[in-house]
Amino acid sequence: MTLAAATELAAATNENLANVSNTLIYSSMAVYTLAFFAYIAEWLFGSRSKVGRTAAALTATDAAKTGVKSGPAVTVNKAGGTAVLERPEVVVRAASGSRDVPDGPGAHGGTEQGDLYGRIAISLTLLAFAIEAGGVLTRALSVERAPWGNMYEFNITFTTVAVGVYLALLLLKKNVRWLGLPLITTVLLDLGLAVTVLYTASDQLVPALHSYWLYIHVSTAIFCGAVFYVGAVSTVLYLFKDSFENKLASGGTPGRFAASVLDRLPAAASLDKFAYRVNAAVFPLWTFTIIAGAIWAGDAWGRYWGWDPKETWSFITWVAYAGYLHARATAGWKGRKAAYLALVAFGCWLFNYYGVNIFVSGKHSYADVGLGALQSVGF
């Protein structure tokens, strides 16, 4: 076989792998859609009558705040004897000042039917994750490099890792099934954007990206983004749940839909604590991501830092998350103020992910996305 024929055969094989990758990505989207409907069924067919537990807990909390102490209730029977009844359980306010109310029963609402649909949803999510991971792998094999050389590849890898983080938390016995529906919804939106607006044919990298730092720097950035996303979803749900608990505590009556959905979530304090923990856990890795990028820039461009738009917004994101963690640890910021700061930090990350890549030109821009926009290698 001549060299030209061998080259043509290799090109055909690469093209075949690229087509397989595309098929797997579309297949994963189909399975994610099935999982999306299963998660909706989990919420719809779960119990809707759990709001009384949160309301009772908040009522008991308010009674404790007013200083009313209830001793054992005593009743007299017909024989003249007395019987001491159990003291009702009283939920007291947590030390941080947030209401110590019980966590909700979860998306399934505590029913067998809801739990069944939830298990089906998780199984479909696992299947879709495996298919999408196969799509990412075959994309990498089609060009024999890391599969994050452009925004399309970054998107499909990012969504795969985000789902992987969710499944890993479930494997660790963490009660995060409430995360399933918002996660799959945004994954479908992100993949839809990837296969339409951001799609780029499988191709080789520009010379500046031929470095082992591509594997280190970009992979850690993708993982950090996935964990930051999990923290952001938890923070948004915390804000809704906190408003719900405040309304109940003030004697208000939430709408039927709000009562059905929000009472199944963990307590506001639990969501707030979960968001803080995941953000704090991944922040050191984000710091390493920026340092690794600077080292790579030194190798590729002869300078470690040049205030390129991507570098600048990566640093802004780092400052925003550092401010959030510092405020929580030293200034005692908890609750809604800290949540708003966390969302600002994630907003900076999102702009770095989409805004800088699409609308801003810099050294990280390598190929055209379409519509006159620019796409970047990622982080």
Image (spheres, rainbow, N blue to C red):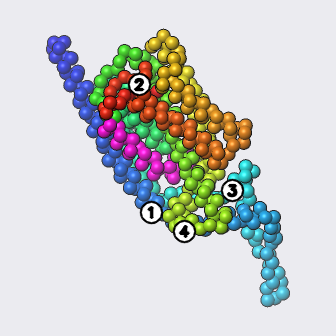
Residue 183 is left or right of residue 52, and the answer is left
> Which dot, 2 or 4, sits closer to the camera?
2
Answer with mark 3 or mark 1, whichever residue precedes in sequence.
1
- Dot 3, crowdedness within 10 Å: few (<14), some or many (≥20)? many
> Which dot, 2 or 3, sits closer to the camera?
2
Residue on which the image places disc 1: 44
Looking at the picture, tell me which residue is in the foreground, 192 or 45.
Answer: 192
Q: Is residue 152 magenta?
A: no
Residue on which the image places disc 4: 49
Q: In the structure shown, which secondary structural element does the residue marked by tag 4 occupy? A: loop
- Dot 1, crowdedness within 10 Å: few (<14), some or many (≥20)? some
**218 lies above or below 88:** above
> Which dot, 3 or 1, sits closer to the camera?
3
- Dot 2, crowdedness within 10 Å: few (<14), some or many (≥20)? some
Q: Position of residue 254 (x, y in %)?
A: 57, 65
Label 3 near label 2: C-beta < 8 Å? no
Q: In the structure shown, which secondary structural element does the residue marked by tag 1 occupy? A: helix
Q: In the structure shown, which secondary structural element does the residue marked by tag 3 occupy? A: loop
Real-space Cα separation, disc 2 to disc 1, in angstroms? 46 Å
Residue 46 is left or right of residue 333, and the answer is left
The answer to which image quadrant residue 265 occupies is: bottom right
Residue on which the image places disc 2: 361
Q: Position of residue 350 (x, y in %)?
A: 48, 36
Answer with mark 2 or mark 1, whichever residue precedes in sequence.
1
Q: Position of residue 373 (x, y in %)?
A: 35, 30
Real-space Cα separation, disc 4 to disc 3, in angstroms? 21 Å
User: Which mark identifies residue 99?
Assistant: 3
Q: Which residues are magenta?
A: 169-197
- Dot 4, crowdedness within 10 Å: few (<14), some or many (≥20)? some
Label 1 near label 2: C-beta < 8 Å? no
**Amino acid type of the residue that numbered disc 2 sits on in the rendered structure:** Ser
Does residue 166 appear anywhere in the picture? yes
